[in-house]
Image: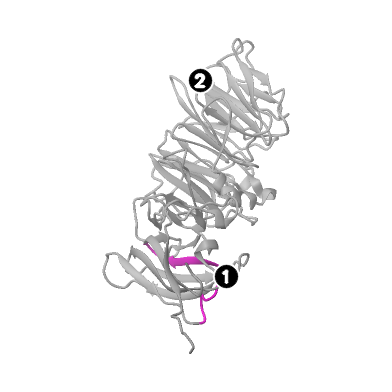
Amino acid sequence: MALWNNLSYKQKYIVREFGAGINGYGDPVSLKPNELVDSANMCCEEYPSIVTRPDRVISTLPETTTPIYGIGARNSSELHVLAGPYWLYSTAPSTGVGWNTVSSSMAGSADATFVEFITQVGRYTICAHSTGVVYNSIWDGATYSTYTDTNSPRSNLYTSHKYRVYGVANDGRTLRYTKQASPIDWTTADDAGYVDLTNINGKPTAITTYSNHVIVWSQHTMHELYGTNQDNYELIDISNEVGCVSNRAFVECSGILFWLDYGGIYMYTGGIPRLIGIKAKKYIDGINWDVKNLICSGAKNSKIFFNIPYGSTANNRVIVMDIKDTSKIMIYTELADFYNYQVISENLFALGTTTRRIFEIETTRRTGYDDSTAATTIIPWYLETKPLCGEEMNTESAIRDIFIEHSGSTLGKMTLSYSTNTHSTSFTSLSTSFQTTGVGIYRHCVRPSLSQLQSLQYCRFKISGEGRKTINGMQANTISYGNVV
């Protein structure tokens, strides 16, 4: 007589949360359950959930008709731009109706730097726009002029510090400084002068003032100037291995200096530069270094933004780092093409490269829409989860159903897709959800067909959509047949 036994099976549920951000370092299967392989236009401001990034609100300032070469600030209240031969400014970047003109006869360059210099009797704005031939320009709020001192550096690497202006000279090896309390005198003996950048390796790429010192980078080295005059200047070589890739690839946030080197993102508070944001390695490795001059950076509150050309000849991806806790930095990305960022009155603005419009970034508006030049544009977003594999899945396993807990605007759209290929970038759609009523939390259920998600050893999911959406997590329920324990 034959004996029939019940077919043994085991049910298991697998939970994925998304609040820890992206980890693009190492094998995706080794990620923590709450880390992501990739995402775009999502952020961690509702941690441990993940949510659509804040809206970008376009300024009412008109689009410039000529290419943009620089963006800067004066007195933290005026937004300045160099647009072709026009030096323009606005006192109301968010609601301005037109630009004011400082000069209409500038000799523009591919990159311009705005530097503010303050004395006890005046405030000056310097537009360092020279590429080695023309003299740079200066404005005191009423009178515009160009430098006439032949010792003034004809470069765009300028900064100011303690009543002096500093600039890297045309030879790329000399750091010049003005007479004390003068923004224009680079010559007076025993007051104005220069410091040799003796150990600089390659062409200087960036300069800034940080923590009471002037810092100069080349592509591969970093140097820090201590002191305030020729009697006590001391140039310290901070690193002979770490540099900065461009003059817009550094930013200060929460009293810490951050910048982009070929090997990654570094931070500095003094002493030795520290490599951080290793989880952004995937995106840094994908940068098109042939156009590294496009890279720009900005910061607001505890977020840092690096706009990069990710496998492209134009900026197309923003690496966003949340540094509330520098021991546990969370990485996200956004989609954008900005020329540069600038803080005005504690608001962060960005200059669009293609549209040449001013956008306010990280606003308090949370609708899931951005403003564009023609209409209101819904924000697209996506995230890619850690793969299911190893002990979670085997050839006797099947995914019976998937639950996604989410909330958002009534126009929010969400699609769940999957891939069973470890290398493919394409996904197969499982379900599309439109949240059309209510504002509460929804638990959306997806049940794969018999031909989907069966007998798998590897599976990864992509959740994508549009509009304002908060996603709290995902649960996949599996069943395994056969000799299971």
Q: Secondary structure at mark 1?
A: loop
Callout 2, which amino acid? Tyr
Q: How many other residues sit within 10 Å of disc 1, few (<14), some (14-19) or many (≥20)?
A: some
Q: Position of residue 87 (x, y in %)?
A: 53, 42
- Label 1 belongs to which residue? 420
Given residues 215 and 275, the one toward you in this image is 275
Q: CA distance from mark 1 to mark 2?
A: 62 Å
Report the residue at 54% width, 75% height from top: 455
- Label 2 belongs to which residue? 163
Report the residue at 34% width, 54% height from top: 365
Q: Is residue 276 above or below residue 484?
A: above
Q: Is residue 122 above or below residue 104?
A: above
Left/right placement of residue 191 relative to residue 200 reads left
Note whether residue 427 is visible.
yes
Left/right placement of residue 396 relative to residue 47 reads right
Note whether residue 89 is visible.
no
In the image, which disc is placed on residue 86?
Answer: none
Given residues 257 and 448, the one toward you in this image is 448
Q: Nearer the viewer, mark 1 or mark 2?
A: 1
Q: Is residue 160 above or below residue 88?
A: above
Given residues 131 and 245, the one toward you in this image is 245
Q: Is residue 285 magenta?
A: no
Q: Is residue 461 magenta?
A: yes
Q: Position of residue 276 (x, y in %)?
A: 55, 39
Q: Secondary structure at mark 2?
A: loop
Report the residue at 31% width, 73% height from top: 436
* Stretch in magenta: 451-469
Callout 1, which amino acid? Thr
Q: How many other residues sit within 10 Å of disc 2, few (<14), some (14-19) or many (≥20)?
A: some
